[in-house]
Image: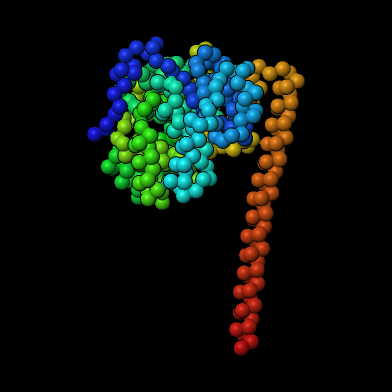
Amino acid sequence: MKQGINKAENTSNLSTHKLGVYCLANDSVIEWFEAFVRSFRKSNPILPLTVIPYDKSVLRLNLLKGPFNFDIMDESECSRFDSLALKIRGGTKGAGMFRKYACFFGGYDQFIFLDSDIVVLSSLDYVLQAFANSSYDFLYFDSDMTMVYKPDFAVRMVAVYGSQGFNAGAFVSHKRAISELELFGIAESAREMNENFVTGCVDQPVLNYVFDILKRRVAHVTGVLPDVAISCWARTPFHYERKIDMAVDNQRKRVPFIHWAGCVYPSMVRKELFLRWRTADLSFVDCCYVSIKFHYNRGRTTLAQTLKKWRSRLLNLLRGKTAWSQCVRKLRQAREH
């Protein structure tokens, strides 16, 4: 049985509680973040936004605080979660990803967490309202078990805990859905389970594991909003309907945002959508500069990837020829003897 946190006192009067959005970012992802914050503020002009710094590199982020009206969480509030990387993964690589856990202890009573590689296509108020009126502790927008647990362990987690293998780059939850005592306690056992987590996904398997072990009430957002698309991933087919001023998928379900999970700047899919929001409200000169810079970097990246691929093929071909030559030489030697 799923064990949830009683939200009744938090949601009985939504207007008396603070709602907001968190985003994890730093200067290294400034291009992603600019597209995110421009799109976010277009459709959510007054919804509070707090950026959780991935690390101390926030100089360029600070320059955007005023124009786009957001706060940057203090380093002392989120840096303590860096230690989770060492506890669970045995190293500090990717430690900044664990800072997203700070959102469960921040200033918003109910919140949406969004990665910086997202563009928001609509108001998010209805999502927060639906969550507040529900009995769930956690809502997600996408799932893929193959990016969470390894096969054998996944079968066990589904059977015992009802694991759903959600994507940790976009979710809705509430303050104290988990406690620090629970989080750091589970981190100790999670280290022993680390070999069962999909390599390279950093915090995603861990966040799933925490909510699975604690048996919190978790559901896809369609559990409270049936008209929302089953996936917001950038590779999922969708189109924009001007008559209703909304992005919808092939089943005409609304797409609240687009998430480029697993995509790399600037070689991502749907580059035209990214550029539309990256250049939103810029002057003609600035728009041209950003577009030219983007296409230049994209061209360089594509060329580098192509050369790397052909280099690999050439090396494989040469290795094959070498192996064949060695085989022929051995046959000749055998005949001579």
The residue sitting at the right extreme is 285
In this figure, which colouring scheme has been used for the structure? Answer: rainbow
Residue beneath the point at 74% across and 26% down: 289
* Whether residue 111 can be seen here: yes
Of 205 and 272, the residue lying toward us: 205
* Whether residue 146 can be seen here: no
Of 240 and 117, the residue lying toward us: 117
Quadrant of the drawing holding the C terminus: bottom right
- Measuring from the top left, give residue 231's x and y in whole percent: 45, 30
Residue beneath the point at 65% across and 72% down: 325
Quarter residue 301 falls in: top right
Residue beneath the point at 39% across and 25% down: 175
Please tell me whether residue 231 is drawn above or below residue 209 in the rendered image.
Answer: above
284 lies left or right of 219:
right
Please tell me whether residue 14 is drawn above or below residue 98 in the rendered image.
Answer: above
Quadrant of the drawing holding the N terminus: top left
The residue sitting at the front extreme is 76
Residue beneath the point at 37% across and 37% down: 183
- Measuring from the top left, give residue 145's x and y in whole percent: 40, 41
289 lies left or right of 46:
right
- Measuring from the top left, give residue 178's x and y in whole percent: 36, 31
Of 211 and 250, the residue lying toward us: 211
The residue sitting at the left extreme is 1
- Measuring from the top left, give residue 127's x and y in whole percent: 42, 19
Q: How many marks?
A: 0
